[in-house]
Image (tube, rainbow, N blue to C red):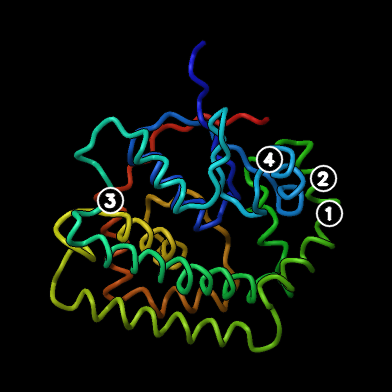
Amino acid sequence: MAPVEPILVAFGISHFCEKARWALDWHRIPYSEISWPPGVHRVLLKRYGAKGSSLPVVLDGENVIEGSGAIIDWTESKAEDRTRSLNPRIDDLAEVREIERRADEVIGVHVRRLAYAETLPSYSHLVKPALFLRSSAWHRLLGHLMWPVTRQAMMRAYDIRPGAASESRAELEAELDWLDAKLSDGRFYLVGDRFSRADLTVASLLAGFARPEQLSRRMTPPDALVADIERWRPRPVMQWVVEQYRRHRNPREEVHRTV
């Protein structure tokens, strides 16, 4: 029996999904990508036996690999060219893992919360098409029908309330200061002398604000987010993200189908 081509299930503009997509592309693993609208995705994840309720996931015909970090681990297990490993040398492992954890739990969380705080209350029309990107016609219809309920559920889940944008903006400012300080010694990689999962994680989670040319999935931002993008553009870490994308992000021609 021929091996089953893996399927990446993603939200179109999700930065965590970009992290998973980049790992798959980095290791040149053939895959198809599909999109499930928010709300609809919970029902479909249960159908495939997922334990959680978040995207991205990879379906490999036997397993459901849940979460961007687990997907990097999975790509490492499938990689044919070990010289391209995203895992660091043993001496750097603890630092790389800590940077990835911090990026996921702080940067990624507050990038998402800031973006939704500035869009879901008054500009949800900008979010919906970006989230539904490449969904099948049937799934898109369900997503549209469920959107009023889904939008409210997202606002509760991400604690979107008055003051949320300011809180997350301040958290991100502190993280950008930390990263600028780390890069101030002229290093090109966050840890060691080669590209690792720490670099991939930080770059992918900040790409929506750094806006590298290689980032193909974008949402039209409202004025408040445009101001953040312009204010943060000169920061060393944002220039670093652009350069990481230029050197290390070469998306292959993707194959998309619905399941």
Q: Out of 45 and 159, give the one closest to the viewer.
A: 45
Earlier sequence position, callout 3 versus callout 4:
4
Crowding near the residue tagged with mark 1, few <14, some 14–19, many ≥20 C-alpha atoms within 10 Å:
some
| CA distance for labels 2 and 3 | 40 Å
| CA distance for labels 1 and 2 | 6 Å
Earlier sequence position, callout 3 versus callout 1:
3
- In the image, what residue type sits under mark 2? Leu
Label 1 SS? helix
Q: Which residue corresponds to mark 3? A: 87
Earlier sequence position, callout 2 versus callout 3:
3
Tell me what residue is drawn at x 66 percent, y 71 percent.
119
On the image, the x and y values in percent for residue 224 come to 57, 79
Q: Which residue corresponds to mark 4? A: 49
| CA distance for labels 4 and 1 | 22 Å
- In the image, what residue type sits under mark 3? Asn
On the image, the x and y values in percent for residue 206 come to 42, 66
Q: Out of 125 and 51, give the one closest to the viewer.
A: 51
Crowding near the residue tagged with mark 3, few <14, some 14–19, many ≥20 C-alpha atoms within 10 Å:
some
**Mark on residue 146?**
1
Mark 2 or mark 3, whichever is nearer to me: 3
Earlier sequence position, callout 4 versus callout 1:
4
